[in-house]
Image: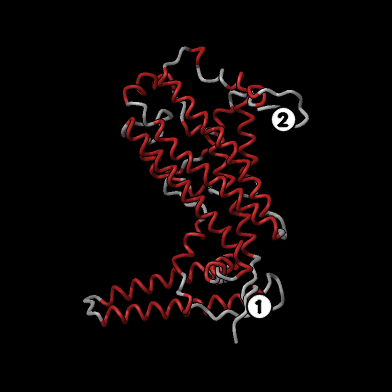
């Protein structure tokens, strides 16, 4: 590969800074092939983490605009799609590490000391950037506490803590998405316009009526089929409807964010909603890929060290399995539970607003 831009006569090695990069795998310590393999795999993860942070930051900044230019939404989708593919690639990367045998790992494990993957500050950074709340972390773990202790040593560890503390104070990607969804036109009514609150509440109430009606029909059908315990079916349907109501009308007030999300998912065939639903799908696909990556991580660790305590004193595999259950974009998943069939959804009003014409 030749020169790059106007920077002069780059060589391939110069452009990629290979001479510096290839000095970072422990050769000077005389590491074994197994340990070098372990180092390279984790360094590769950290390089991908750096790209993930860049992609997510750009997507966050796009969605943080008020208003978001329509032409920018596809760019946000592209950033999320690339991040998803990186997570899928990283999930496959665990299979490479699985070529390390238990005995091969134990031969150098003590040399790690208390070093742990939990100390990956880039992982903690992209979690905060995504919108993982401290209260949602399992086992009451405060990731910043680890870095506060490390920062007592000063130097780069102090810089890392400052970087993480700044990131936690910034808007998250999920927060930017929810503010964007909140401005979704519902039944042709624009956010903040005259009568918007009444229109949105009317839509939500109509949807909940349809949701209740479908539940009642299910109870009747089960009874007609000879279900021996119709009372338990009724309880489940009532509980489902209460959950749907609490989702859309938390604290007695309609959530316009969730109403907008419900509208996009319910009428996703409308031309004007093409990119909004692609964007939401991109978020769901991203979280699905992250969950698989975490799950595969746990299986790799269990295969190599079983149920041992982690090097940093964590619960090892149990902790990793628990993190695979993290859900950051909770509303995007939960809304799917309360959708109704197209023929049961509220009749679309102002269809021309969405680029959709109903034949007369």
Q: What element carries label 2?
A: loop
Which residue lies at the image location 40% right of the left edge and 21% below the top edge? 34
Quadrant hosting residue 315: top left
Q: Quarter of the image for the N terminus: give it.
A: top right
The residue located at (70%, 71%) in the rendering is: 192
Residue at which label 1 appears: 352
Image x and y of residue 241, in percent: 42, 73
Residue reaching furthest to the right: 6
Name the residue beneath numbered marker 2. Answer: 4
Q: List x then y, in percent, for residue 338.
A: 46, 69
Q: Distance between the residues labelled 2 and 1?
A: 50 Å
Say above or below: 106 vs 357. Answer: above
Left or right placement of residue 167 versus residue 244 in this view: right
Point out the image quarter for the C terminus.
bottom right
- State which quadrant residue 353 falls in: bottom right
Closer-to-camera residue (101/224): 101
Q: Is residue 297 above or below residue 33?
A: below
Q: Which of 171 and 154 is in front in this view?
A: 171
Q: Quadrant of residue 347?
A: bottom right
Residue displayed at 49% across by 12% down: 29
């Amino acid at each position: 590969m030749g020169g790059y831009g106007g920077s002069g006569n780059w060589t391939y090695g110069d452009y990629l800074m290979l001479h510096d990069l290839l000095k970072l795998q422990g050769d000077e310590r005389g590491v074994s092939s197994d340990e070098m393999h372990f180092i390279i795999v984790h360094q590769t993860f950290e390089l991908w983490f750096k790209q993930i942070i860049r992609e997510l930051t750009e997507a966050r900044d796009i969605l943080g605009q008020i208003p978001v230019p329509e032409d920018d939404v596809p760019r946000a989708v592209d950033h999320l799609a690339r991040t998803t593919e990186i997570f899928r690639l990283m999930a496959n990367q665990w299979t490479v590490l699985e070529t390390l045998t238990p005995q091969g790992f134990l031969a150098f494990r003590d040399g790690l000391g208390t070093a742990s993957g939990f100390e990956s500050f880039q992982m903690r950074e992209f979690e905060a950037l995504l919108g993982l709340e401290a209260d949602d972390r399992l086992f009451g773990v405060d990731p910043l506490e680890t870095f506060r202790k490390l920062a007592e040593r000063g130097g780069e560890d102090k810089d890392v803590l400052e970087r993480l503390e700044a990131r936690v104070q910034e808007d998250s990607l999920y927060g930017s998405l929810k503010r964007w969804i909140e401005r979704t036109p519902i039944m042709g009514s624009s956010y903040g316009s005259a009568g918007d609150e009444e229109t949105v509440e009317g839509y939500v109430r109509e949807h909940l009526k349809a949701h209740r009606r479908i539940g009642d029909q299910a109870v009747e059908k089960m009874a007609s089929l000879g279900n021996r315990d119709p009372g338990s079916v009724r309880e489940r349907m009532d509980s489902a409807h209460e959950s749907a109501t609490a989702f859309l009308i938390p604290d007695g007030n309609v959530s316009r964010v969730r109403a907008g999300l419900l509208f996009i998912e319910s009428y996703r065939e409308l031309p004007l909603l093409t990119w909004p639903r692609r964007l939401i799908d991109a978020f769901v696909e991203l979280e699905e890929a992250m969950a698989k990556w975490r799950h595969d991580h746990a299986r790799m660790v269990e295969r190599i060290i079983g149920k041992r305590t982690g090097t940093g004193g964590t619960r090892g595999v149990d902790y990793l399995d628990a993190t695979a259950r993290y859900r950051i974009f909770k509303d995007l998943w939960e809304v799917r539970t309360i959708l109704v069939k197209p023929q049961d959804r509220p009749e679309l009003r102002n269809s021309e607003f969405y680029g959709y014409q109903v034949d007369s």
